[in-house]
Image (spheres, rainbow, N blue to C red):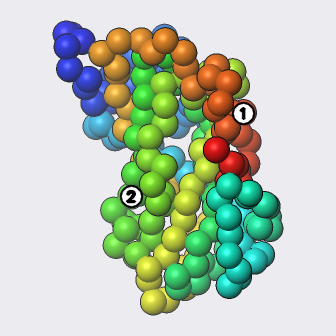
Amino acid sequence: MSHDIMALMSDIDVLDATDKGEIQINPFDKNLLGPDSLDIRLGNEILISKIIGKIIDPNKPKNFFASRKIDPFTLKPKQFVLGTTLERISLSDSIAAQIEGRSSLGRLGIMVHMTAGIIHAGFGAKEPSALTLEIYSVNPNSVYLHTGMKIAQLSFFRLNRKVSRGYDFIPTSKYVNQNKPCVPKAD
């Protein structure tokens, strides 16, 4: 395979990369692997806003979230929560990933990421990490969120060249070794 163009990895590529340790997914269920993406599941904890109607300064973030266990959680119309993935992932310095919603939840008006769709090469390299999901509902009805439900999908990309430093080894990286939903951190 030529590495002149960054390529979306097929199921065969993903399995080969997991065998080589370039991609680690814990737990890994091969039944969740599609032709060119991997379904990932919702973990058992979410963060809900405990401050409503106030001004939030991104330069001075405070923890304005409260933790809740899912069993199930009722996501209300126009509600925003932070979730976590059941799967913990680790990417080598030559593989990045993209997170997207699943069409079945999209058709219910549920978004799983607002802008943070890229998982950088080297993410989870120190220790496989969960992903924080930015979940929002545009559905006019409430929707149950269940632990273990398929919530999103990952597509993997082999980079043209290995990165000089993976995400976990950049001193300014803020979201390293996540094992639960992570609150915003100042830049």
Q: Is residue 162 left or right of residue 134?
A: left
Q: Give residue 29's position: percent from left, percent from top.
A: 52, 37
Decide which of tag 2 and tag 1 comes sooner along the chain.
2
Q: Is residue 22 visible?
A: no
Residue 169 falls left or right of residue 150: right
Q: Quadrant of residue 15?
A: top left
In the depicted structure, whether residue 37 falls above or below residue 137: above
Q: Which residue is mark 2?
A: 102
Please identify the quarter of the rendering in which residue 138 is found. Answer: bottom left
Between 132 and 17, the residue placed more toward the observer is: 132
Q: Of the residues shown, which amino acid type is indicated by label 1?
A: Asn
Q: Residue 7's image quarter? A: top left
Residue 6 in picture, x, y percent from top left: 26, 23
The one nearer the camera, 179 or 5, is 5
- Which residue has dot 1 on it? 177
For label 2, the SS is loop
**In contact (CB < 8 Å): disc 2 and disc 1:** no
Quadrant including the C terminus: top right
SS at badge 1: loop
In the shown orientation, is residue 17 left or right of residue 165? Answer: left
Q: CA distance from mark 2 to mark 1?
A: 25 Å
Q: Residues within 10 Å of mark 2 (few under 14, many from 20)?
A: some
Residue that appears at 52% across and 82% down: 78
Residue at position x 42%, y 34% in the image: 97
82 is higher (above) or lower (below) than 166:
below
Label 1 neighbour load within 10 Å: few <14, some 14-19, many 20+: some
Residue name at image x 44 percent, y 40 percent: 118
Split into 4 quadrants, where in the image is the N terminus?
top left
The kind of residue on which mark 2 rests is Arg
Point out residue 58 in the picture as x, y percentages from the top left corner. 65, 59
Question: How far across and down, in percent of the image, does residue 186 sit?
Answer: 69, 48
